[in-house]
Amino acid sequence: MDYSKQQDVPLYSALEKFRRLRVVPFDVPGHKRGRGNRGLVDFLGQQCVEIDVNSMKPLDNLCHPVSVIKEAEDLAADAFGAAHAFFMVGGTTGAVQSMVFTACKRGDKIIMPRNVHKSAINALVLCGAIPVYIDPKVDTKLGIPLGMEIDDVKKAIADNPDAKAILINNPSYYGICSDLRTIVKLAHDAGMLALVDEAHGTHLYFGDNLPLNGMAAGADMSAVSMHKSGGSLTQSSLLLIGEGVNEGYVSNIINLTQTTSASYLLLGSLDISRRNLALHGKESFGKVCEMASYARSEINEIEGYYAFGSELINGRSVFDFDETKLVINTRGIGLTGIEVYDLLREEYDIQMEFGDLSNVLAYISIGDRLQDIERLAGALDDIARLYSKPEASFFSAEYVTPIVKATPQEAFYAEKEKLPIDETVGRICAESVMCYPPGIPILAPGEMITREILDYIKAAKEKGCSMQGPESEDISELCVLK
C-alpha cells in the first residue's frame, strides 16, 4: 500500500469543490439542493442535501468511471491489496450477487456453504445457477453453524468437477472462519473461481493478528461491507477483484443491476472511509480487539453467560476466529438470545446487532468506547440477576440441514399454492423463510419442508425473532410447489 497516496480523497475533494461553486441546478434531484423540500433540509442538514447530486462531468459517473471515481476506486484497490475495486451502492447484497453472476450462468454449478446470506441464494434465483451445498458442522452447545471443513470441500469438488466457483464466508456473523487459503487453492487447482463473502470482514484487511482476508488468500473476488466495520454510510460497499479477473466484464455485470443514479453521499463516504482505514485502521482495530477482549473477560465473569472466542479454534470447522465479534451465549441464564436482545433494548436502551435462539451479538467497531462496553456488561449482569430462569431446552443449533429437491430458480418461478404452514410438511417450499438479522435462510426455495424446520420457525416466532421472506406477513402460510 502506498501510504503517501492514501491521504488523497479525490471524489470527496471533487464534491467539496462542487459545493463551493454554487452551480445553478437544472438537473435532478428535484429538491434542488434542498430548496424544494425544507423538511429534508431540517432532517439531513444543508451540507448533506447540497452534495446529494446527480452524475456530471466534474463528478464522474459510477456506471463508467473515468476520473475522480476511478481514482477513488484505484486507491481503494491499493488499500485492500486488490487488482481493482468497484464502489457499490446497493450494499454487499449487490456485491455478492455480482460475484455469482460473474462466475455463473443458468445451469452452472456453484459450491457454497448452506449457511450463506440470503443475497447469495437470491442470486441463484435470478441467474439460474445450481447450488452444491456444503452443510456446515454445528456446535450444538452454542447453537451456531461452523465453517467448511476441507474434507467436505474436497468431496464437493470431486463430486462436481464441472462447478464454476466456490463461495466462502469469511468470517461468519459469529466470527467463525474456514481455512480460506486452502479452499482458494483447491478451487484454483480444480479450475474454479474462489469468491469470498466478507460482509463482516472489512477489518481483516487492516488489523493485526486477525484472520486472513480474501485478497491476501488469493481469492478471485471478494465482497466487503465497508458500512459494517469500515465506518462508511449504510448501503455502501466494495467489490474487490484479484489478478486475472476481467475487470470490464465484471463492470458490465454490475451495471446489469446497479442503479444509474448512484448516491454521492454513499460514494463520498466510501472515499473518506478508505482513507481513514488506510491511515489509521491498524491502530483503530487494535483498540477494537482490546475492547472486545475486555468485554469478553468481563461478561464471562457473570454466571450463566459465555462470550466465546479463539478457544473454539480446532483447525477444522473453526480454522480461525474473528476476535472483534462479541457473541454471548445466553442459554445458561435460561433466556434465548432474542429475549436478552429485547430486554437490553427496552429496559437499558442498548441496541444489539441481533439475537437468535441461543446468542446475542454486540458488533464492536471503530466507533465504540470503553464506557459503552462497561454499560453493556452492567446491563447483562442486571438481566442475569433479575430475569434468569432455570436453563431451558432450546433447539440444538441455529441451522437445520435442508433436503434440496429443486434449484432456487425452478422453485421460485414454478406454479405454486399458498397453504397454512402446518399443512406444508413434505411439500417443496417456493420462497425463503429467515430470521433477519442474520439473514441466513431457514428454508430456501426448492427445499422440502419438514416438521423439524416448522418447529424451529414457530419457536423463533414465539421468542420474538424478526421473521421475513414469505408472502404471508405473519408467516402463517407458505407458498409451496403444486
Image (cartoon, helix red, strand yellow):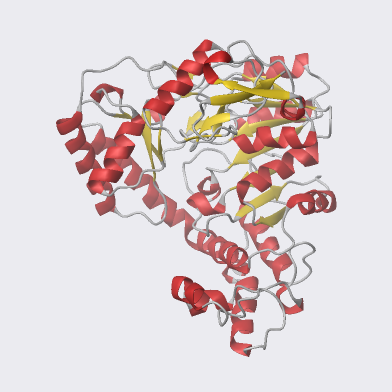
Query: In this figure, what is the number of numbered marks?
Result: 0
Name, please, the residue furthest toward the left: 385
Quarter of the figure with residue 10: bottom right
At x 55%, y 20%, the residue is 420
- Residue 157 image offset from top left, x and y in percent: 74, 19
Q: How far across and how far down the image is residue 434, in percent?
A: 53, 30
Q: In the image, is residue 353 above or below residue 113?
A: below
**Residue 295 in the image, given as x and y percentages of width and height:** 29, 41
In screen coordinates, is 98 left or right of 229?
right
Front-most of residues 382 and 244: 382
**Rendering coords of residue 225 (x, y %):** 57, 49
Instruction: Answer yes or no: is residue 147 visible.
Output: no
**Front residue of this view, candidates 72 and 417:** 417
Work out whether residue 274 can be spotted. yes
Q: Is residue 69 above or below residue 315?
A: below
Residue 262 in the image: above or below residue 353: below
Residue 220 lies left or right of residue 426; in this view the side is right
Residue at left offset 59%, top offset 23%: 148
- Image quadrant in which the C terminus is located: top right
